[in-house]
Image (spheres, rainbow, N blue to C red):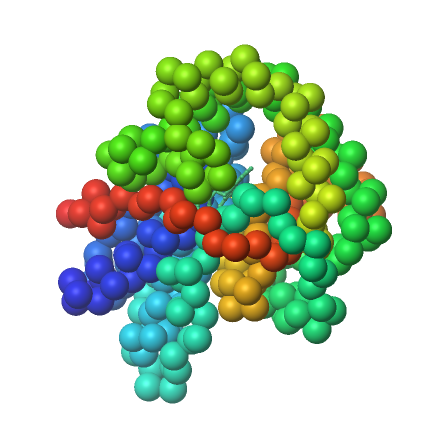
């Protein structure tokens, strides 16, 4: 495809969310479209052993491409990979009837906002809008609007948190993606910049010392419980099957949800711990009365002022050939 259009699509895709902001993707320009390749050098082997979150992230980037392509007058025909190392192929078909998707405007303004939210509730009309934000096979959204509705979910979040923060390998992997200063974040253009997480700048040595010695399962559980006191609701993305196609579709669904939320001025952030710890994931599925399904993302939502945006790598570093 034309290089200018390719770059336009890669720019949109690169703004997608990804686990620990690893940006685990590469893009290839081919005659009839774009190929999204997984970048396994940016995998998270501890928290994401089976690469489900990596493919969810690719699904988010894919959805940004679909939205941006419609603004170029293209419909997308998508070929999903067969196995857990494959690429996603996007064939672009020129269609004069394809109109501008107004979600495009929110690709740049969407963010994960890890602040403590205000106590304002989200109207049912808006939650209905969020529920209708996507329609992908095998993906279901469970939405708990209001503290009394999501109260039963909290113990699973805390259980997942406690398992993760008692696991040294999890903490080491997490901290390796922390960017403790603006200078470092600007240099790597990836990872979790402390300012976008609402934390002070502190430098790597002090930052790692604090993370490893003062941030404990207990202190995190306390922080999360407090955050949940100021959360309007919780959304859980559940897949019927635990395979690569479902992971990509969960990513696509989550990205549309995030763009719709942004359009409504609603902030979102992940509390994925119960989805990442397999033993807790199955308990959560049972509590949702779908013991054979797979809760893959858990999102809190509410209202908050924007935070500094996290960085993205340069387009030239994302492109193959
Ligand atoms: C599959 C996936 C898993 C994620 N898991 C977490 C998480 O467990 N905790 C968290 O705070 N953020 C999580 N995030 C959010 C990312 O850290 C965030 O997207 C990334 O830092 C880029 O920031 P942005 O979304 O503001 O652009 C996740 C995002 C994705 C796509």
What residue appears at the point 51 percent right and 20 percent down from the top-left corner? 211
What residue appears at the point 62 percent right and 19 percent down from the top-left corner? 216
Can residue 38 be seen here? Answer: no
Q: In which quarter of the image is residue 201?
A: top left
How many labels were placed on the picture? 0
Q: Is residue 29 above or below residue 22?
A: below
Viewer-proximal residue among 126 and 50: 126
Residue 273: x and y in percent read 63, 34
What residue appears at the point 67 percent right and 35 percent down from the top-left corner? 224
Q: Is residue 37 left or right of residue 290?
A: left
Q: Is residue 206 above or below residue 27?
A: above
- Pick out the residue farthest to the bottom: 97
What residue appears at the point 70 percent right and 47 percent down from the top-left corner? 230
Residue 187: x and y in percent read 24, 34
Residue 64: x and y in percent read 40, 61
For the N terminus, give its image quadrant. bottom left
Q: In which quarter of the image is residue 242?
A: top right
Q: In this view, does 80 lie to the left or right of 242?
A: left
Viewer-proximal residue among 234 and 45: 234
């Amino acid at each position: 495809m034309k290089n200018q259009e390719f770059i336009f699509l890669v720019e949109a895709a690169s703004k997608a969310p990804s686990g620990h902001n690893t940006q685990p993707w590469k893009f290839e320009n081919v005659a009839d479209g774009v190929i999204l390749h997984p970048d396994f050098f940016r995998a998270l082997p501890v928290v994401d052993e089976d690469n489900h979150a990596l493919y969810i992230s690719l699904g988010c980037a894919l959805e940004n491409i679909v939205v941006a392509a419609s603004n170029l007058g293209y419909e997308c025909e998508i070929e999903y990979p067969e196995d857990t190392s494959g690429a996603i192929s996007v064939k672009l078909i020129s269609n004069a009837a394809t109109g501008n998707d107004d979600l495009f405007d929110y690709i740049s303004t969407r963010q994960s906002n890890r602040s403590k939210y205000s106590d304002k509730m989200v109207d049912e009309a808006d939650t209905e809008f969020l529920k209708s934000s996507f329609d992908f096979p095998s993906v279901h959204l469970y939405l708990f609007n209001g503290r009394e509705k999501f109260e039963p979910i909290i113990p699973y979040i805390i259980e997942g948190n406690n398992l993760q923060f008692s696991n040294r390998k999890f903490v080491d992997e997490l901290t390796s993606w922390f960017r403790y200063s603006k200078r470092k974040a600007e240099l790597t253009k990836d990872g979790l910049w402390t300012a976008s997480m609402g934390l002070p700048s502190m430098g790597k040595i002090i930052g790692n010392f604090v993370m490893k010695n003062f941030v404990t399962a207990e202190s995190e559980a306390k922080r999360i419980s407090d955050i949940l006191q100021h959360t309007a609701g919780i959304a859980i993305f559940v897949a019927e099957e635990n395979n690569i196609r479902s992971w990509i579709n969960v990513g696509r669904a989550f990205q549309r949800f995030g763009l719709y939320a942004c359009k409504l001025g609603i902030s979102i952030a992940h509390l994925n711990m119960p989805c990442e710890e397999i033993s807790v994931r199955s308990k959560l599925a049972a509590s949702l009365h779908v013991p054979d399904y797979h809760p893959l993302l858990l999102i809190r939502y509410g209202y908050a002022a924007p935070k500094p945006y996290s960085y993205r790598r340069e387009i030239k570093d994302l492109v193959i050939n």
